[in-house]
């Protein structure tokens, strides 16, 4: 699974980093999220899926 964050849609709500802290990091400047790495380790995939569904801006996408 690969994860991507659309920086134009992300508003820095930080929900993804709270749900999957090992998969998302937040910018110190504006709080926007970025994936730690494009490929999601198998043990983090369920949390990343939950983060995708929890993002109010629908800024996170995954490709299986």
Image (spheres, grey):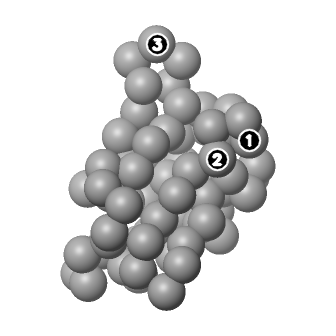
Q: Secondary structure at mark 1?
A: loop
Q: Position of residue 29 (x, y in %)?
A: 46, 13
Question: How many residues crowd mark 3 within 10 Å: few (<14), some (14–19), many (20+)?
Answer: few
Residue 40 — which label? none
In depth, the one of 35 and 57 nearer the eye is 35
Mark 3 and 1 residues: CB-CB less than 8 Å, in contact?
no
Question: Which x, y percent locates residue 33?
Answer: 49, 39
Residue at (61, 66) in percent of width and height: 61
> Residue visible at 73% across and 57% down?
58
Q: Earlier in the sequence, mark 3 or mark 1?
A: 1
Mark 2 vs mark 3, foreground winner is 2
Q: Quadrant of the N terminus?
A: bottom left
Q: Residues within 10 Å of mark 1 (few under 14, many from 20)?
A: few
**Which residue is situated farthest in the top direction here?**
29
The residue labelled by disc 3 is 29
For the point 23% across and 81% down, which residue is it?
43
List the residue tagged with mark 2: 6
Q: Is residue 18 visible?
A: no
Does residue 44 appear in the picture of this structure? yes
């Amino acid at each position: 699974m690969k994860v991507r964050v659309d920086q134009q849609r992300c508003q820095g709500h930080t929900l993804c980093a709270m749900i999957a802290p090992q998969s998302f990091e937040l910018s110190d400047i504006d709080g926007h999220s970025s994936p730690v790495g494009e490929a999601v380790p198998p043990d983090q995939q369920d949390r990343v899926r939950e983060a995708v569904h929890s993002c109010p801006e629908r800024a996170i996408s995954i490709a299986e």
